[in-house]
Each structure stands twice: as C-alpha cells, then as structure tokens.
Image (spheres, rainbow, N blue to C red):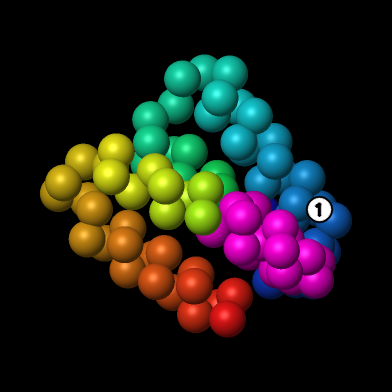
Amino acid sequence: SKALAALGDAEGAVLHANRCIQICAANGADALEQLYGYECLAVALGVSGNTEGAQAAARGARSLLAAIAPDSREAVALDLDALDRLLA
C-alpha cells in the first residue's frame, strides 16, 4: 500500500490498505499489525487528497498505541509522529 502511494496510485493504495485492515480484523491480528494497517490507510488517503479520511485513519492508528508491547511502543510512536508530520 505505501509503495503504491509513493508511486501515486492512490486508488490501489487505499484498496490494499483497506484489505489489510479487513484481514487483520478477520484473523484477530495483534494491535501492532492493526496499527500499521491504519497507518498505511492514512498515507494512502493522504495521497488521494482525502485529508479528513487520512486524519481519521491516523487517529485509528494512534488509538492502538497503548495496546502495543512496551518494548516496541517508543519506535512505533516515532512512526506515528512521522505520519502526523506527513499529514500536516
């Protein structure tokens, strides 16, 4: 999804990010996998010009941060901070 977004294929990026989120939900994925699904969706929606949707997806990602294992949380928080800067 992020590769497609980088190539400017916003529609494909959104499709793949949504599919990732669906697969995570259907298979009981852990919070880390879910969080990065929402992070990819935020990037894809940002590329598509859907600022409101991108911000909502970023909030969805950030809402999962507390459920991430403590030893990974700091690195993931840095990724979310970078996402916030990208969407600003």
- Is residue 4 something one can see in this rendering? no
Residue 42 in magenta?
Answer: yes
Question: Which residue is pictured at 29% across the width and 38% down the height?
Answer: 67
Q: Nearer the viewer, residue 10 or 53?
A: 53
Question: Which residue is pictured at 21% across the width and 41% down the height?
Answer: 69
Q: Residues within 10 Å of mark 1 (few under 14, many from 20)?
A: some
**Spot occupied by residue 27 in the image (x, y as percentages of width and height):** 52, 18
List the residue tagged with mark 1: 12
Q: Main secondary structure of the magenta part?
A: helix
Q: Secondary structure at mark 1?
A: helix
* Image quadrant containing the N terminus: bottom right
Q: Tell me if 40 is positioned left or right of 75 in this view.
A: right
**Relative to 20, residue 25 above or below:** above
Residue 82 in magenta?
Answer: no
> What is the span of residues highlighted in magenta in the rendered image?
41-58
Question: Which residue is pictured at 80% across the width and 71% down the height?
Answer: 49
**Spot occupied by residue 31 in the image (x, y as percentages of width and height):** 38, 36
**Spot occupied by residue 73 in the image (x, y as percentages of width and height):** 24, 53
Residue 8: name its quadrant.
bottom right
**Relative to 49, residue 13 above or below:** above
Q: Nearer the viewer, residue 42 or 2?
A: 42
Which residue extends farthest left?
71
